[in-house]
């Protein structure tokens, strides 16, 4: 008989800086209130477009947000990952 060992998933690389974690939390909190475009998030937070995109991409890969289709300037990001796009 073989004993079953629990494997712990090890994270690769260095931990994310606390500043990046706070940004992701801010973006996620804003999206929980209502869907927003990337530019609306930039205006609301005062963050640069590239920084907001990095947060959105991390949140998307974690399954916390989704990008809805539409014209590039009007694409909404939403936390309702299982529901229809707004």
Image (tube, grey):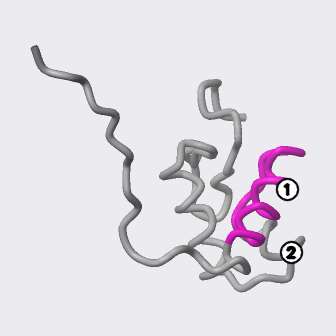
Q: CA distance from mark 2 to mark 1?
A: 9 Å
Query: With 35 as the anchor, is 59 left or right in this view?
Result: left
Residue range in magenta is 21-38
| Name of the residue lying farthest toward the left | 1
Of mark 2 and mark 1, the one earlier in the sequence is 1
* In the rendered image, the vertical position of residue 74 relative to residue 68, given as above or below: below
Farthest top residue? 1
Q: Residues within 10 Å of mark 2 (few under 14, many from 20)?
A: some
Q: Nearer the viewer, residue 63 or 70?
A: 63
**Which residue is at a point 79% across and 67% down the rendered structure image?**
41
Q: Position of residue 17 (x, y in %)?
A: 63, 80
Indicate the quadrant where residue 51 lies: bottom right
Front in this rendered view, residue 19 or 82? 19
Is the magenta region chiefly helix, strand or loop? helix
- Percent coordinates x, y for residue 33 in the rendering: 89, 45
Q: Which residue is mark 1?
A: 30
Residue 47, relative to residue 68: is it above or below? Answer: below
Residue 19 circle label = none
- Residue at numbered disc 2: 45
- Whether label 2 touches label 1, CB < 8 Å: yes
Give the residue at x 62% y 67%.
55
31 shown above or below 50: above
Q: Is residue 20 above or below residue 61?
A: below
Task: Out of 14 and 6, give the one closest to the viewer.
Answer: 6
């Amino acid at each position: 008989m073989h004993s079953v060992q629990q494997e712990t998933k090890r994270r690769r690389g260095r931990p994310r800086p606390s500043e990046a974690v706070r940004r992701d939390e801010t973006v996620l909190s804003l999206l929980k209130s209502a869907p927003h475009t990337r530019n609306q998030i930039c205006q609301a937070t005062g963050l640069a477009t590239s920084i907001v995109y990095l947060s959105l991409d991390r949140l998307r890969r974690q399954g916390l947000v989704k990008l809805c289709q539409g014209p590039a300037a009007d694409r909404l990001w939403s936390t309702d990952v299982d529901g229809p796009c707004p």
